[in-house]
């Protein structure tokens, strides 16, 4: 776990050399604005993700919890975590679930606990990270 200051420094160091060269030659730096949530989303990919979500919801409603293998569930969860984190890091103000909907409080708590356990993190570490980053 790194501090926000270290992460910010690392992001600044990752600026491509060509942009640094253009800036040094007097060219104006390009101002980059965060796109609103969903603006950059590929329509076909989003539709496919929504179809998968609906299939999972239907399976759960009919009592089937085995629609995905453990490996598929883990791969999907990892990809969703990475995608959400990338959007937040890019400055988007988006919640991972609709407010007061999408999942029950118990389902969120079970998932959050599982994610922390999988990453070998404690709730205390989450609290410290939140106080450092303001998230």
Image (cartoon, grey):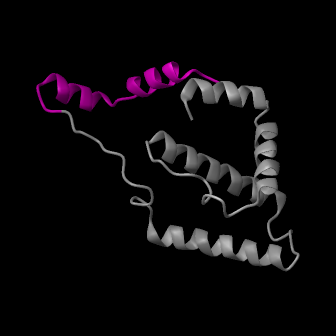
Q: Main secondary structure of the magenta part?
A: helix
Give the farthest residue toward the right.
Answer: 63
Q: Quadrant of the C terminus?
A: top right
Asked whether 68 falls inside the magenta stretch, the response is: no
**Quarter of the view holding residue 31:** top left
Q: Position of residue 56 (x, y in %)?
A: 74, 72
Residue 135 lies left or right of residue 113; in this view the side is left
Give the farthest residue toward the front.
Answer: 100
Q: Quadrant of the N terminus?
A: top right
Does residue 63 lie above or below 38 as drawn? below
Residue 9 lies left or right of residue 108; in this view the side is left
Give the residue drawn at x 44%, y 62%. Answer: 41
Give the residue drawn at x 52%, y 68%. Answer: 46
Give the residue drawn at x 82%, y 73%. Answer: 60
**Quarter of the view holding residue 107:** bottom right
Between 135 and 52, the one nearer to me in the picture: 135
Magenta highlight range: 1-28
Give the residue drawn at x 45%, y 47%. Answer: 92
Q: Position of residue 105 (x, y in %)?
A: 77, 54
Does residue 51 lie above or below 18 as drawn? below
Does residue 24 lie above or below 47 as drawn? above
Query: Is residue 85 visible in this depiction of the protein?
Result: yes
Q: Position of residue 80 (x, y in %)?
A: 63, 53
Asked whether 19 falls inside the magenta stretch, the response is: yes
Between 132 and 33, the one nearer to me in the picture: 132
């Amino acid at each position: 776990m790194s501090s926000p200051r270290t992460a910010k420094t690392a992001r600044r160091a990752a600026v491509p050399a060509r942009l640094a060269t253009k800036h040094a030659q007097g060219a104006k730096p390009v101002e980059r604005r965060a796109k609103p949530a969903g603006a950059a989303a590929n329509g076909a990919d989003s539709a496919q993700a929504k179809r998968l979500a609906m299939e999972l919801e239907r399976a759960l409603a009919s009592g089937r919890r085995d629609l995905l293998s453990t490996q598929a569930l883990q791969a999907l969860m990892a990809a969703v975590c990475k995608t959400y984190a990338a959007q937040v890091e890019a400055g988007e103000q988006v919640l991972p679930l609709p407010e007061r909907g999408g999942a029950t409080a118990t389902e969120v708590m079970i998932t959050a606990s599982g994610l922390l356990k999988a990453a070998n993190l404690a709730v205390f570490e989450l609290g410290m990270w939140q106080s450092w980053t303001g998230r």
